[in-house]
Image (cartoon, grey):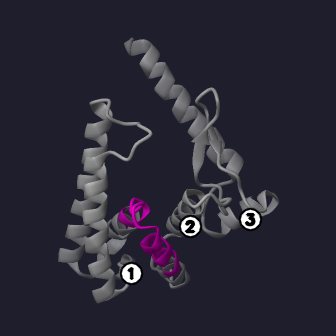
Amino acid sequence: MSQNLADELVMMMMEDQRLLRQLFDTGELPSELYHPRMKVLHEKNASRLKEIINCHGWPGISLVGEEAAKAAWLIAQHSVSDPDFMAECIGLLEDAVTREDVVGWQLAFLQDRVLTLSGKPQYYGTQFDVDENGWPTPFPIEDSATVNERRARLGLNSLKERQKQILEQERKRRDNIEHTS
């Protein structure tokens, strides 16, 4: 395992999450616009991930450990300014899932994100929008009758269970807002 590479990836993920929290706490997120500071950080991280991939291939568990492999996925997931790179990462993750070098949910989330960003129906039902009342609802799903089979193959719970979790999170968030107002 490459500890230096693992540490670097984890630091990139922590920086991403720290900036996201900071922007959210200051009220700069959520917004319809891609926050410029977030965009700069995402592009910097994606550029470095490309270099890592060119040298080592996909940084999976065998190379960097589980937490850093998750960090690599997060960096790819947030590379929205470079949809071609995100699509390349899907193929790399498919191979890594086959080798059991990453966990399957990472592939599901990235593939669905790329599909929904390009206006296509998602495949695994991992991406949610909000309805007219602000409640989470899944983006359209290709062949929704078999989505739970696809989700199970990658270790995800059923779509109904996931929706219940997300709705509960939103209820708690709304309760917190009401109690702090």
Viewer can see residue 165: no
Above or below, comparing residue 26 to residue 47 in the picture: above
Q: Earlier in the sequence, mark 1 or mark 3?
A: 1
C-alpha separation, residue under disc 2 versus residue under disc 3:
16 Å
Quadrant of the rendering where the N terminus is positioned:
bottom left
**Magenta-highlighted residues:** 75-91
What residue do we see at 64% from left, 39% from top? 164
Above or below, comparing residue 163 to residue 39 in the picture: above
Report helix, strand or loop for mark 2: helix
**Horizontal placement of 93 versus 16: left or right?**
right
The location of residue 80, given as percent across then percent down, is 42, 60
Say whether residue 22 is magenta: no
Residue underneath mark 3: 149
Q: Earlier in the sequence, mark 2 or mark 1?
A: 1
What residue do we see at 64% from left, 29% from top? 132
Residue underneath mark 2: 111
